Image (tube, rainbow, N blue to C red):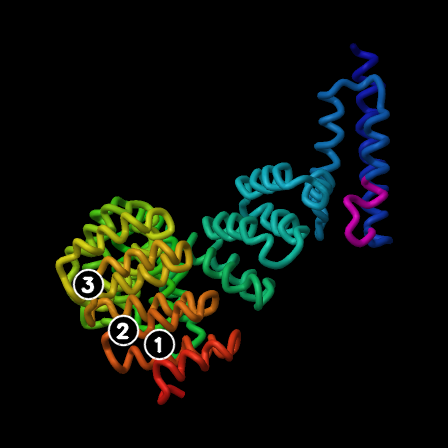
Amino acid sequence: MNSFLKIVLPWAISLGVVFFLGFYTGNQNAKPPSGGIINEAVEGNERKKNTVSGIDNHKAMLVEDLLTIQTITESNPPMPPNLQRIMQGGDIVERLGTYLDAVRSMDRSNVELVVKAFEELPSGYGRHLEMKLLMRSWANFDPEGALAYASNSLDAKSERRFGISEALAGWAVKDEQAAISWAQANHPGPDKSDNPLLVGIVKGLIETDLEAANRLFLGLPSGTARWQASSLLAEKFSTQGTGKAIQWAESYPKDDPRMRETILGQMGARLARQDLDATANWVKSMSDEPGAYRVMENLIHQWANQDPGATASWINELSDPKKRKHAMKELSGRWAGIDPSATADWLNSQPPSVQIDPAIASFVSRIQGVDPEGAVGWASSISDPALRDKSLKQALNTWQQTDPEKANQWLKKNDPNQK
């Protein structure tokens, strides 16, 4: 044992130092090959370490630790070799796992190394997850540093806005008011106008204080930021249960009708994917406003793809004539793309009236490309003269492009004045 400590261990450590110096000098004098997994100096270092005999795993780890410690203490430190190798050449599971470990241990002392690891990744949209982890962790101890990096170092076209948003989201979790103050001070537009930076703060607050996020959203001026924030909140509230989701959507002030319609439509799209029955009941209970029809359209879009017959039965039971008229038009257009024959049977089962006319016109527009003759026949059955003439003209134009002889024969026989 004494001979081991006196001879082998010092020799191992010295060997590690020599390997480190060779690696560092090689890095200073030559650039690594473009796109390579690891430069030749690191490969040589790895091969030599693997050939060291007579040293157990613990001693080998000491040598590797010594190399890493000495690397970190340099004034302009390169990324540790093992991390470099994995970030450049590891598969996605290994790469993300290693990167996540680095981000978890990130603080002021090693932030430069973690940033180097991030920058080893190909730039662009493909590293947004890694960027989110970097910005969120960095914002925990130095949000302004994270924001400075995002503002000055990330690509303006594909990454900068996302990086700033995530840094602000992380900061808002820790200090909402400080994050808001920074966003206002760095507002890219005129004061009190649409401020996209506030969306990141809403994003962060959603994770920890949904009510605070909603209050901030309600105070935003009209514009893109409010629309983006509404989408984030709709997504979050849709996971809080159908009742709470509907309550939030319907609570939006009516003095902003366009935004209210947008929010109701957003929520309708989400709830229709989660619970058709609950969304169908919501449509029935809604007052006559534009947002109610957006919810209905999203419901029918989802339902018709799954069970158009059940959708038709639900529409037949609607007591509100205006809602029923709109719903029939929506279903006719959706169903015709799935099963034109079944759609025709359903329309034939309805009593002729002005109320069904929009549904027939929608059906005509969907089938005229594949059955122009049939489309002309359906268009002729529309009760409203103006809508009938419009639909008939469109169907005849399509028919004349595919079979002008038959189309002109129909014109002579049925309507010699039709152009």
Q: Residue at x 79, y 48 (%)?
A: 36
Q: Which residue is mark 2?
A: 382
Place of residue 215 in the rendered image (x, y in percent of width and height, measured from the top left): 25, 60
Q: Is residue 319 above or below residue 90?
A: below
Give the Cα distance between marks 2 and 1: 9 Å
**Is there CB contact under 8 Å for labels 2 and 1?**
yes
Give the Cα distance between marks 3 and 2: 12 Å
Q: Is residue 396 above or below residue 138?
A: below
Mark 2 and mark 1 lie on one chain; the one further toward the N terminus is 2
**Is there CB contact under 8 Å for labels 3 and 2?**
no
| Three-letter amino acid code of the residue under disc 1 | Ser
Span shown in magenta: 33-42
Q: Which residue is mark 3?
A: 351
Q: Nearer the viewer, mark 1 or mark 3?
A: 3
Q: Which residue is mark 1?
A: 391
| Three-letter amino acid code of the residue under disc 3 | Pro
Q: Residue at x 39, y 69 (%)?
A: 375
> Is 18 displayed left or right of 344 in the figure?
right
Any part of residue 233 in sight: no
Q: Nearer the viewer, residue 140 or 10?
A: 140
> Is 216 displayed left or right of 366 in the figure?
left
Mark 1 and mark 3 lie on one chain; the one further toward the N terminus is 3
Q: Residues within 10 Å of mark 3 (few under 14, many from 20)?
A: few
